[in-house]
Image (cartoon, rainbow, N blue to C red):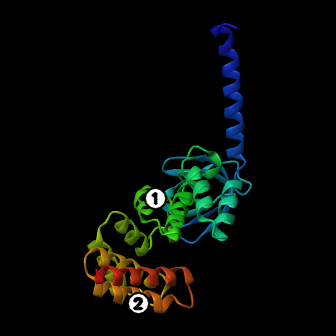
Amino acid sequence: MTARCLIPAATAALGLWLGVVGGALAQQHVSIRMTNGTTLDAEVVKVGERSLSFRAGDSALAVDLPYDQIATVVWPEPSEWIQARQFFDTGRFQEAAGVYEKLAASKVDPRLGYPSPGNYATLAQRRLVECHRRRGDAAAVAKSLPAIETDRLPAGERELPAALHAWAALGQNEWNHVIEIAEKAVADGLSAASDEGIELAYLSGVAYRNAGRPEDALIAFGQAYSLSAGTDPRLSRAAMEEALRTLEDDER
């Protein structure tokens, strides 16, 4: 078959693919939550770079709404997202991370709704970082955190926890920065007894030890251990192990 004969076939195949993708997108029914508190159900016409085009109700006319007026768009859940959530909810963070990573890299998939607020590609990147956090992989958090496009997250999730930034600083060996993040979070009103407060105490302990301040490290680990003993066995065990390691290093 010659190249000339292949052109019509390729054109037809491309047209069929575009029709399938366009049709799939046109049939996407979503819930749009606007910044003024209004919520409406709509059929998506186009996901633009700065706005969402949709039809609401029985109207045949498409409305173009800028993203700065949208708090979030609730898209139908892709099957991969459901699978990743099941992994995550059962503590299988490594497996969940693999699925989230693939979703985060699939921004062109029309099912994900990128780049609208609440799209699944950006949500997957956020969940990927959370998997690394749950696994205690500071280097992976440091690598993945900058890729989160916070303005494309749902409005209520755009301010990331201080603990994430502390994990990232730890992954870059920025010991003093970890301590500063933890101190600022508590000064800004975060309860030291909250889950995040306990996590920051643990991270501060690691930073203190690496910065050559073993006494401060032991105090921080002791705080993390005592407050997490009945609520988070994983963190409690880690704090105890790090405290023992600090004592061993100090005796040498």
Q: Quadrant of the C terminus?
A: bottom left
> Toward the viewer: 86 or 27?
86
The disc, 1 or 2, on the residue closer to the chain's N-terminal end is 1
**Which residue sits at x=62%, y=59%?**
95
- In x, y percent, where is residue 228? 51, 88
| Local SS, label 2 | helix
Give the label on residue 222, or none.
2
- In x, y percent, where is residue 47? 57, 48
Residue at the spot of label 1: 148
Of all residues, the one furthest to the front in this rendering is 252
Q: Are marks 1 and 2 in contact (CB under 8 Å)?
A: no
Q: Is residue 210 above or below residue 220?
A: above
**Which residue type does callout 2 highlight?**
Gly
Q: Quadrant of the N terminus?
A: top right
Mark 1: few, some, or many residues within 10 Å (few <14, many ≥20)? many
**Which residue type does callout 1 highlight?**
Ile
**Which residue sits at x=62%, y=52%?**
112
- In x, y percent, where is residue 103? 59, 51
Q: Is residue 117 visible?
A: no
Q: Is residue 200 above or below residue 226?
A: above
Q: Is residue 110 visible?
A: yes
Q: Is residue 173 above or below residue 57?
A: below
Question: Marks 1 and 2, Cα distance to the nearest angstrom?
Answer: 33 Å
Give the label on residue 165, or none.
none
User: Comparing marks 1 and 2, which lies closer to the viewer?
Assistant: 2
